[in-house]
Each structure stands twice: as structure tokens, then as C-alpha cells.
Amino acid sequence: ELINVHSTINLSANAMSLTGGIAGEVLGGEIQKSSFRGNITVANTASILVGSIGGISGDLVNGYISDSYASSIITATASNTSNFNCGGGSGYSYGSNISRSYFAGSISCPGTNMKTGGLVGHLENTFLSQNFTASTVDRTVAPNATGSLIGISVNSTYDSNYFDSTLSQSSECNHALPAACTGVNDGLTQATY
């Protein structure tokens, strides 16, 4: 359990397996009232075929993120044969709960198999509630797996999630699942709890 953890640092890595501003991987744990400020730059120079990068956590599995935020420029490069997840909050989330959390900044994770989202890249069996992202998300390489809030979503549920359409390159919360967002908050740049 990580509570009131605040990190201000620039991260740079040469292998993308699991990289996060606060934790690379959260398995059955919690991150609460925590924050990350800084840039994350990852180049997948190693032969790693699967990985996740996120402003708060790389992977979130059966865990919780609440009342937390990241402010970052996230940049990642991977070969087109790699399968990576890239998100402002978490790259990948499975069986988890993300609530009252926020990401501000920009995300550029090109690669034809990248799943990229303003909050979560690959969302599966996860509940999202009262989250917000004010981010620019690069949609140029894999637009069908890129969204202003979520890259791709499988069997997940949502309540009151928002993105700032003035920064997004798309009005879509998620390419295949626009209902994941309740709406947009134009011009909102800070969340308060």
C-alpha cells in the first residue's frame, strides 16, 4: 500500500517491460493520495515483446489507484512487432479500480501494436470512476487502439469520467467505446478532491 507518495523526477529507460512514475507494477495493492511529476522516456532497445508504461503505474492488476495524479510528458518507442500499453495513469489495468484520479500532459507512444490512452492504455475488467485527463494523445500510428481516456477496453465499467477536448486530437473517449466518458470538461486543467 502506497499512501501519500510524491515523486518528482525524470525517468529514462532502455527497456519498456514495466515502467511507472510511482510503481512499475502493482499486484493486489493500492496507490492512494499520491502524485508523480516529471517526464518518462522509454526506448525499447531490448528484445522485450510485452510491456506497459504509465504516469502512476505500468501495470495495475487486482489493485486500486485513488485520489492520485500524474503530470508528465510520456514518450515511448517500440518495434511494430511489440505489444505495449501506454497510459497517463496506468499502461495496463486488469481486475482493478481507478477512481478520482487525474493525468495532465502529453503521451506519444507510436507503434502499430500500441494501446494508448490518456488515462489507461489497455483496460480490462476494471471500474473507472470520477477520473479526468487533460492530455494530448498521439493518434497517428494506431488510431483504432488510441483514445482520449482509454486505448482499448474489455469488460470494464465506467462512471463520470471526463477528458478535456480542447487538448485532445479527437472527440472520442475511446475509438470503439465512446460511452466510457460521461462527457467533456472544456478548459478544466486541475482536479480537486
Image (tube, rainbow, N blue to C red):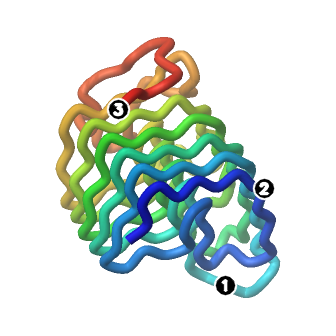
User: Which residue: 59% across, 75% down?
Assistant: 18
Q: Nearer the viewer, residue 7 or 18?
A: 7
Q: Which residue is under mark 2?
A: 10
Where residue 61 sits, quadrant-wise, is bottom left
Sequence-wise, the earlier of marks 1 and 2 is: 2
Q: Residue furthest front?
A: 4
Residues at discs 1 and 2 in contact (Cβ within 8 Å): no
Packing grade of label 1 (10 A; few <14, some 14-19, many >=20) is some
Observer-side mark, 3 or 2, equals: 3
Which of the numbered marks, if any, corresponds to residue 185?
A: none
Residue 116: image location, x then y, percent: 53, 52
Packing grade of label 2 (10 A; few <14, some 14-19, many >=20) is some
Residues at discs 1 and 3 in contact (Cβ within 8 Å): no
Q: Is residue 7 left or right of residue 25?
A: right
Callout 3, which amino acid?
Tyr
Q: Which residue is under mark 3?
A: 193
Residue 48: image location, x then y, percent: 67, 84
Label 3 sits on a secondary structure element that is loop
Q: Nearer the viewer, residue 159 or 153?
A: 159
Q: Residue furthest bottom?
A: 47
User: Which residue: 52% across, 21% down?
Assistant: 189
User: Which residue: 41% across, 50% down?
Assistant: 33
Which of the numbered marks, if any, corresponds to residue 48?
A: 1
Callout 1, which amino acid?
Ile
Observer-side mark, 1 or 3, equals: 3
Label 2 sits on a secondary structure element that is loop
Q: How many marks?
A: 3
Residue 1: image location, x then y, percent: 38, 71
Q: Quadrant of the C terminus?
A: top left
Q: Is residue 179 left or right of residue 70?
A: left
Where residue 62 sits, quadrant-wise, is bottom left
